[in-house]
Amino acid sequence: MRINNFHTDCIETHRPGGLILTRAALDHCTLAPGDRVLDAGCGCGATCTFLCEDAGFRVFGMDASAERMARATAGSQDWNGIRAKLPRLPFAPAAFRGIFCECVLSLVPDKRDCLYTFFELLQPGGHLVLTDLYLPGAPPAALQRPALTCLDGALNKTDLTRIIEQAGFKIRIWEDHTRLLKQMACEMVFKHGSLDNFWKTLTGDIFHDCQGTQCRAGKLKPGYCLIVADKMTA
């Protein structure tokens, strides 16, 4: 599956940049064909299919939604999919050489526990690839609050960096790709008719939510980032 344009990428993956950032992350990872990789929060499986068919990895995908997992696995026999809910994953320690968690961590209530789980599941020298929204300097609420959408659960750069490093990772790459979020917003405005409707797709119809309200008012402008973090060898 070779998806090579921004519009199709976003449709297939439902996240800013789509597989553009997945490809970019691979350039920063020492992964080889045959390596075991996990897509944590795989949705309908576009990334799993790409990692399997184009990169040649042994891919495992997981998602909390039975409907999404059914759709994801219906079209491919080349990778394994399971239904599970982060941070509880039914894999042995050091099971994977790479873990991809794209536009998902912000949705996890206990982000610290999730990152510790990722660290345990990675082999020494393995890579964690994260893409997600982040808030530019705005203080977040509690790190363990429920998140209805990725915007609700987004952290600022300082706190996101801290919890990744506290889990034991060394961040090697932090790239800002807010332009891809803006580009997706333009696509959604064209599709839905207004920027307000675009923010509804990220925040839900919850106008009294503080961060959602600030975004709609233009007072809070979230960014979007790519992070590659390594589990260092002893």
Image (cartoon, rainbow, N blue to C red):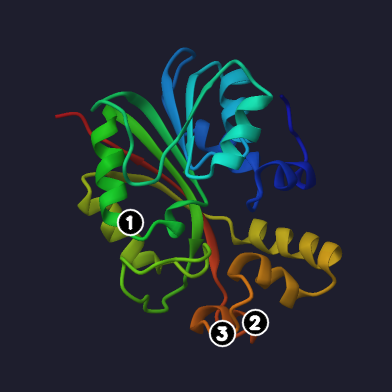
Q: Would residue 25 be found to the left or right of residue 161 on screen? A: right
35 w.r.t. 143: above or below: above
- Tell me where residue 12 sits by quadrant: top right
Q: Would residue 193 be found to the left or right of residue 234 on screen? A: right
| Residue that badge 1 annotates | 111
146 w.r.t. 36: above or below: below
- Tell me where residue 73 sits by quadrant: top right
Point 27% across, 44% down: residue:
170
120 w.r.t. 167: above or below: above
Please name the amino acid that badge 3 sits on. Gln
Q: CA distance from mark 1 to mark 3?
A: 23 Å
Residue 172 x, y percent position in the rendering? 36, 44
Q: CA distance from mark 1 to mark 2?
A: 26 Å
Q: CA distance from mark 3 to mark 2?
A: 5 Å
Which dot marks residue 216?
A: 2
Which dot marks residue 214?
A: 3
Which dot marks residue 84?
A: none
SS at circle 2:
helix
Residue 131 x, y percent position in the rendering? 50, 50
Residue 74 x, y percent position in the rendering? 66, 26
Earlier sequence position, callout 1 versus callout 3:
1
Earlier sequence position, callout 1 versus callout 2:
1
SS at circle 1:
helix
Q: Quadrant of the C terminus?
A: top left
Point 54% across, 70% down: residue:
222
Contact between labelled residues 2 and 3, with CB atoms less than 8 Å apart:
yes
Point 36% across, 34% down: residue:
127
Residue 69 x, y percent position in the rendering? 57, 35
Q: Residues within 10 Å of mark 2 (few under 14, many from 20)?
A: some
Q: Residue furthest left?
A: 234
Please name the amino acid that badge 1 sits on. Lys
92 w.r.t. 110: above or below: above
